Each structure stands twice: as structure tokens, then as C-alpha cells.
Amino acid sequence: MAKTKSVYFCNNCGAESPKWIGRCPVCGEWNTYVEEVVSTKSAAGGRGEFGTMEQSKVRPQRIDDIQITEESRIDLGNGELNRVLGGGLVRGSLVLIGGEPGIGKSTLILQTVLALKGQKVLYVSGEESARQLKLRAERIGGNAPDCYIVCETSLEDIFVHIRNVDPDIVVIDSIQTIATSAMESSPGSVGQVRECAASLLKFAKQTNTPVLLVGHINKEGSIAGPKVLEHIVDTVLQFEGDRHYLYRILRSIKNRFGSTSELGIYEMRQNGLREVSNPSEMLLTQNHEGLSGVAIAVTIEGIRPFLIETQALVSTAAYGTPQRSATGFDLRRMNMLLAVLEKRVGFKLAQKDVFLNIAGGIKVNDPAMDLAVISAILSSNMDMAIEAGTCMTGEVGLSGEIRPINRIEQRILEAEKLGFKRMLIPQNNLKGFDTSRLAIELVAVRKVEEAFRQLFG
């Protein structure tokens, strides 16, 4: 009988300690160490079938002698997912997709693999039965004869199924439900998640087979389990959105084979997820004419420009302390913009409630949203609507100046394509820019006061 011992692991970074300590010496977090019972045979290197393989003998090479070859990618037939991954799924890569419960992670993966042609897929489910997956596949209208379903939670048995099926793509749903017999702790613990992910990584690299992992997130919104899980995988995708809204956002948090600034947008329907190719039309309600507190911002995520509706409501504070609330926008940045309005422009908002909302239920971090935010706030404060067909973009500095932004030409062309007649942009962005071929009127502003005169007269 193998001897067992207790080891303490940090939930945040995965650091190991022989005894419990209050503060992790690696990441500095408090009260993150949890006790796990591990077997001594795990120290012998037994990481499943592929974890015991001997590595090939390698020798150091000069960097000039290393040959560079184009990464072989698999076209997933999903334009949004391909874009976020950097052009497709790289062979031999380990991809982690995280998101809140019920947001649509399993639906996204199942819908994608069912639409693949010529690729044999093994879908390993540790949470749902085969019947449940079949019902979901019928609901989303998928029919793929090369998609194999197995319900299994043992890592060693999963490798047996992989050897028998010999798939081109492996899906694990989810990594927190998989356990290896090399460790005696329960599934989902720090040690189990780390060991299983390391074994799957070794399998992916040795066999050149891509592996898709579905991961849970904790109440803070980060991937559950040890932080080392995100270091092990090649790509981390975050599937986010409000379940009360129809739209879902797929973001790249980490990508060794592409950009991390890409964004994919989906619409949740009864028969699955629909790709949104034109997010600007999705995020504009088109019925705000004559309404105060609404401004249209031209923002950009990665290399993708789109127009978004910014809504604000300013009212007299009903209680002693005025309320400040922002949905989809950084609350601290909104407070900064309110301070700029009061100090530089002279609008007294200290005794008023201010509520800000980004339409569509998405979160935007682009600094070019600043001009639209303060315009919507002042429009609501004065109860004056912004003229229809007007949009704006620009970053607001602490001294009240409108600072230049990047990719201005893409933003202008997107606004022109959607039929906008007038656009406010930072003055410095007009230097060396040819406006003769544009049908949209560009209004260059240098300070916040100039922008307000252009909008409200």
C-alpha cells in the first residue's frame, strides 16, 4: 500500500508547501492554501498514460539554426472563433475556454465541432450524459458522423478512448471534473487540475493533436483552479455576457499563436449561437432620435471598429449622498470624467445622481469612449438631445483637452458606412488626413468646451 502525505497548495498560483501558511510567499495572497492528500506514486511521475513517456533527447541549438515553419491551423468553420484564435485552431495546441455557468461555453464548442467537415472529434463530457448532449445537438441542428461522445471523468480511461478513436481534435468538458489516479485528492482540486492539464498538454505536444478545455470561473470572474492552469495552456479565451441579454462576447486573454486584442460577438438563440458579423447594427437601437442622454461612440476592439450607444441619466439626488453607477464602463474613469466636467467646464454635478449604461450589455475599455460619455451626461443634465446622425470619438484628458486616438481612419469609415453624417474627432487626428473623399462631415475639436458648442450650440 502506497504511503500518503498531506501537501498544501495555493489556490491562486499553485505554489506548494509542506505546511499551512497564511500568506503565500510566491503571489502574496492571504488564506489561499488548501490541504490535499497526495500519494507518493505521483512523485514518481505517473501522469496518466502520456505523462510517463520518455522525452526525446534534445540538444541546445543556436537561434540562427532554428527553422521556422508556418503553424498548421484547422479551420473551425466559425468566423468569430477563428478570428479570436488568430486564424484557426493550431495543431498541437491546448486551448482553455472559461465563462460563467449557463453562458453557452458547451453550446459554442458542441456547435463548432458538429459543423466540422473531415475532422474526427472526441467530445469527453464529465458533466452531462450522452443523452443530454444528443438533445442539445438536435436543438442546435448539428449532425456530424465523425463526432464521438464519451462520458468519462478518469484521465487514464480518457487516454484509452483517445488511443482507440484516434481523433483529430479532443474536447474536455470540463477540466474541473477530470481526475487522475496518480493523486488521491478529489476532482477539481488544485493538484488534480494541475496534473490533468499537464498530462493533456504533453499529449497534445507529442501527438500534434489540439485539445479544447472548458473551464469554470469563480465568483471573482477568473478561471477556477490554480493560476498555473492558465500558464500551462497555449490560449485562454473568456466567454462573457449577461444571461439577461442575447449577446455574448468571446475575448482572448492569452494567445501564443495570435493577438490578444481580438473580439468575437455572438447572439444567443433557441437553436444555438449566431455569429454577429456587423456588431454596429446590433448595438444601435435606431430609435433614440429626440431623446436626451444618448450619445453614439465609435469604439474599437482589437482591429474591429463598431459603433455603440452610450446612455446616461442625471437626476437630483434623492438622498444625502449622490449615487454613481456605471454598467459596462469603468466607474472610476466615469468619476474622473465627472471631476473634469466640474473643474474645467463648470457644470455642477456634485449633488446629482449619475447613471451610465453601455447598450447591449457589453463591457468597453476603449479610452475613445470618453467624449461620448461626457456628452451623454451633459445631454441628460440639460435635457437636450444630440442631433441625429452625429457620432463622436476621443479621449478626454484631465485638463479638459481632447486627446488623439489610434486607428482613426477605420473608425471614420465605419461611421460613414452606417450612414452617419457628422462625426466629432480630436483635432490632432486630422493632421495629414485626406478628407476630400469622405461623405461624412468631420468636426475637429481640441477641448471639451468646443465639443459642447458643436453639439448643443
Image: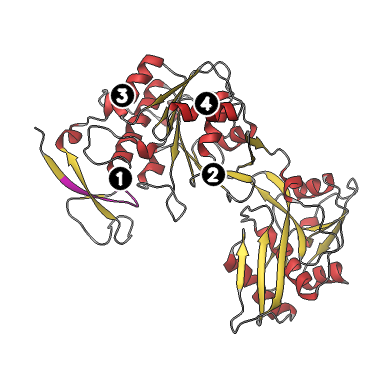
Tag of residue 270: none
Tell me the kind of residue under disc 2. Ile
Q: Are marks 4 and 1 in contact (CB under 8 Å)?
A: no
Position of 444 compared to 114: left or right? right
**Cα–Cα gap, marks 1 and 2:** 24 Å
Q: Tag 1, which secondary structure? A: helix
Residue beneath disc 3: 157
**Cα–Cα gap, marks 2 and 4:** 31 Å
Tag of residue 71: 4
Q: Nearer the viewer, residue 67 or 284?
A: 284
- Part of the protein shown in magenta: 6-14
Residue beneath disc 1: 190
Query: Which comes before the other along the chain, label 2 or label 3?
Result: 2
Q: Nearer the viewer, residue 351 or 143?
A: 143
Query: Which comes before the other along the chain, label 2 or label 4?
Result: 4
Quadrant of the drawing holding the C terminus: bottom right
Instruction: Indicate yes or no whether the magenta region holds residue 12.
Output: yes
**Cα–Cα gap, marks 2 and 3:** 29 Å
Residue 337, x across and y down, in percent: 66, 71
**Cα–Cα gap, marks 3 and 4:** 30 Å
**Residue occupying image coordinates x 22% and y 29%:** 46
